[in-house]
């Protein structure tokens, strides 16, 4: 079979060369004898599980400052944004809650045992090579057990060193400046130590005053104006430093990397604009540091006795240590003076094995261990410690038109308190939990890239340390939140090479999914007594989510090096709160901040180093409370962004210049109630590549 492939390739080469070369009048026929060449390649199968991706080049085209900004262009995603460059930004996938999304940085999850959320605004876009968002989990079997444990996963893949032919180093320096006194320099250096070992280091600094003009008004239930405010956003400043360095190695059948990361910031926390008051003195300090390493490789174990080819064993081993600090200050004594500091540490180890029984059947097993502990300066703090063990078994079939993947995950969690109190005399204990998942993909007609797919998955998320042990608020009897997902969809891809002189190539991609999700034992905060500052965490929530995600992309390759691309996403969601049947206002209501309709569109035109990019985001009507009454109504909002860039090529270096205008029509809107977002703003970017 391999010899046949070689003969076909050589024949095609000769034919094409003969067509491209004018025939000579006098020709000399020569014969050559060449050694046999064996051509091998790994077949790239279509993933069973739907994925949305943005690669590095597309991320640079979009007018985004952070990972959270980029995720707005994915379907099924809701972003909570408290405004400005330094505003905290979290993401929710398919309305299941922020805690049900796992965020992975170069293959290892970013943890936060304290409150379970990851601020996506702190990641610098300059060093990110790809963002990939999965509903469920990714299709690979060689992955950590933790990868199976989330309802959705976001993979942030940073750039591995890249070099031009003959060069052993590269240097990229970038400067961003713009509205709100934005200054954001960054530098990336890459060095080829040997052909198989590369080094990369990058650093960035971010400053913004966070001051921008806004206008916000509120209406009474009878639609008369309650108050109308125009002002300048205060206390939204940020100073942040990020540094990262790592070594990357390549093996004949694998790769490895080790990396260190450091982030430190001080930011103001702007308050909600209520009754013409918008000044605030709240501050937050963050320091995050981690070191992580990963190794994966494959070994051939000999020929298969039944089917041709070799049996393969693959191993993935990863480890991580992280150390985080957070301080929150609220000096306002008219409310409640707060000055809390927390220190987190995490140790994480994982190992995974994958065995290829046949070319169409694989087995895998994974085991994880994670240790977390949290210290704080609060009076009566119990200093919790947590040990988590996870084990997963998975299998995958890929035979002609059928692709099947199934797995089961076992999770064991044990907490202990270093300083128990009378209110919290003991830690929570959880029984082992087993969560299965099944994914199926069917290709009716093999020559066409058309797939029908479906999946079922169960997951849960443990209560965080804040949910369980926060002084005078935690509840050690909380049960984990449980989520069940059902999904069905289709996907079609078509590549056409055209003979038309103007249009050379056309690429079409369409994807549609319908889904039904259930979230049980949802953890919510309820008032404790009559004080608005005393709360208790309870398992009271039950939510059902029905939705549709649509994605469509077109790419045209015209003559004269002109490329036009268009990407459109649409999401419909009906996310209902069925917590309390005795509450007619909230029972069956759309949950807070989830729009029924949302969509985005991006378009770009590229020509010989020039790039013009347009993006549009629309978020429909929604409510800021499950009581869907007029007083809680939030109007739709939309933004238009425009960016123009040019790449200049010199003899030994390149330079790109970009100009961006965001919120082109100066839309005044809120993502979160009473937290106004910026109006029209701009940014200029200069990038040098050596």
Image (cartoon, rainbow, N blue to C red):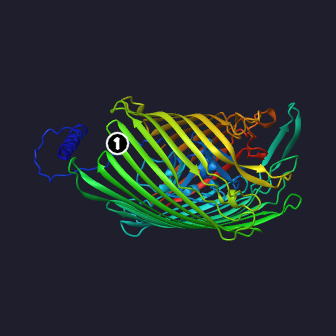
**Quadrant of res 86:** bottom right
Considering depth in this image, is 236 or 476 the residue closer to the camera? Answer: 476
Q: Residue 156, image x and y in percent?
A: 53, 54
Could you tell me if residue 510 is visible in this image? no
For this view, does 536 lie left or right of residue 258?
Answer: right
Q: Residue 330, image x and y in percent?
A: 81, 61
Considering depth in this image, is 268 or 91 the residue closer to the camera? Answer: 91
Helix or strand or loop: what does disc 1 sit on? strand
Could you tell me if residue 419 is visible in this image? yes
Considering depth in this image, is 598 or 60 the residue closer to the camera? Answer: 598
For this view, does 10 lie left or right of residue 623?
Answer: left
For this view, does 1 lie left or right of residue 61?
Answer: left
Q: Residue furthest top?
A: 500
How many marks the image carries: the answer is: 1
**Where is 259 relative to 556, above or below?**
below
Considering depth in this image, is 509 or 60 the residue closer to the camera? Answer: 509
Q: Residue 322, image x and y in percent?
A: 57, 67
Q: Which residue is mark 1?
A: 398
Identity of the residue drawn at 47% across and 56% down = 145
Identity of the residue drawn at 39% across and 30% down = 501
Neighbor class of circle 1 (other Cα within 10 Å; few <14, some 14-19, many 20+) is some
**Quadrant of res 295:** bottom left
């Amino acid at each position: 079979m391999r010899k046949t492939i070689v003969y076909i390739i050589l024949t095609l080469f000769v034919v094409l060369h003969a067509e491209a070369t004018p025939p000579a009048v006098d020709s000399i026929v020569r014969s050559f004898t060449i050694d046999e060449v064996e051509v091998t390649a790994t077949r790239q199968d279509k993933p069973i599980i739907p994925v949305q991706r943005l690669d590095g080049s597309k991320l640079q085209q979009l007018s985004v400052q952070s990972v959270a900004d980029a995720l707005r262009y994915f379907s099924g995603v809701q972003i909570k944004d408290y405004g400005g460059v330094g505003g905290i930004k979290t993401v929710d996938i398919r309305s299941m809650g922020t805690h049900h999304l796992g965020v992975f940085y170069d293959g290892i999850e970013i943890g936060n045992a304290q409150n379970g959320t990851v601020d996506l605004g702190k990641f610098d876009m300059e060093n990110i090579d790809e963002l990939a968002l999965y509903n469920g989990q990714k299709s690979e079997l060689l992955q950590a057990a933790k990868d199976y444990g989330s309802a959705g996963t976001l993979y942030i893949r940073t750039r591995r060193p890249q070099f031009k032919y003959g060069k052993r180093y590269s240097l990229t320096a970038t400067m961003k400046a713009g509205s709100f006194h934005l200054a954001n320099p960054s530098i990336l250096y890459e060095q080829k130590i040997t052909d198989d070992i590369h080094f990369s280091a990058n650093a960035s600094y971010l400053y913004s005053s966070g001051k921008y003009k806004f206008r916000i008004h509120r209406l009474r239930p009878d639609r008369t104006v309650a108050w109308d405010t125009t002002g300048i956003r205060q206390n939204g400043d940020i100073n942040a430093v990020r540094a990262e360095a790592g070594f990357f190695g390549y093996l004949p059948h694998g790769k490895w990397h080790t990396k260190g990361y450091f982030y430190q910031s001080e930011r103001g926390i702007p308050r909600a604009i209520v009754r013409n008051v918008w000044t605030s003195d709240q501050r937050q300090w963050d320091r995050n540091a981690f070191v992580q390493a990963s190794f994966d490789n494959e070994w051939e174990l000999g020929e298969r006795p039944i089917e041709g080819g070799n049996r393969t064993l693959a191993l993935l081993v990863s480890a991580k240590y992280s150390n985080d600090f957070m301080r929150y200050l609220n000096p306002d004594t008219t409310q409640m003076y707060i000055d809390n500091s927390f220190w987190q540490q995490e140790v994480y180890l994982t190992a995974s094995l994958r065995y290829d029984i046949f070319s169409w059947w694989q087995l895998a097993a994974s085991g994880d261990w994670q240790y977390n502990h949290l210290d704080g300066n609060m009076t009566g703090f119990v200093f919790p410690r947590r040990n988590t063990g996870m084990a997963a078994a998975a299998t995958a079939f890929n035979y002609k038109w059928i692709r099947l993947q199934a797995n089961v995950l076992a999770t064991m969690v044990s907490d202990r308190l270093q300083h128990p109190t009378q209110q919290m005399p003991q830690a929570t204990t959880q029984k082992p939990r087993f969560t299965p998942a099944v994914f199926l993909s069917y290709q009716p007609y093999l020559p066409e890239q058309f797939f029908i797919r479906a999946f079922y998955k169960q997951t849960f998320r443990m209560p965080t340390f804040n949910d369980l042990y926060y002084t005078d608020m935690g509840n050690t009897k909380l049960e984990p939140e449980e989520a069940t997902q059902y999904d069905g969809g289709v996907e079609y891809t078509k590549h056409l090479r055209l003979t038309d002189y103007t249009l050379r190539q056309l690429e079409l991609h369409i994807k549609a999914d319908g889904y039904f999700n259930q979230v049980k034992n949802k953890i919510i905060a309820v008032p404790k007594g009559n004080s608005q500052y005393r709360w208790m965490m309870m398992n009271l929530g039950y939510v059902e989510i029905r939705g549709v995600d649509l994605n469509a992309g077109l790419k045209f390759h015209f003559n004269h090096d002109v490329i036009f691309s268009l990407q459109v996403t649409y999401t419909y969601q009906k996310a209902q709160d069925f917590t309390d049947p005795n509450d007619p206002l909230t029972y069956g209501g759309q949950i807070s901040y989830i729009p029924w309709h949302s969509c985005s569109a991006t378009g770009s035109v590229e020509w010989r180093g020039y790039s013009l990019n347009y993006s549009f985001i629309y978020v429909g009507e929604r409510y800021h409370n499950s009581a869907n009454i007029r007083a809680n109504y939030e109007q739709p909002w939309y933004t238009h962004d425009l960016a123009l860039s040019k790449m200049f090529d010199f003899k030994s270096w390149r330079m790109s210049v970009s100009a961006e205008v965001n919120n082109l029509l100066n839309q005044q809107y809120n993502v979160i109630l009473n937290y106004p977002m910026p109006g029209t703003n701009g940014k200029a970017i200069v990038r040098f590549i050596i």
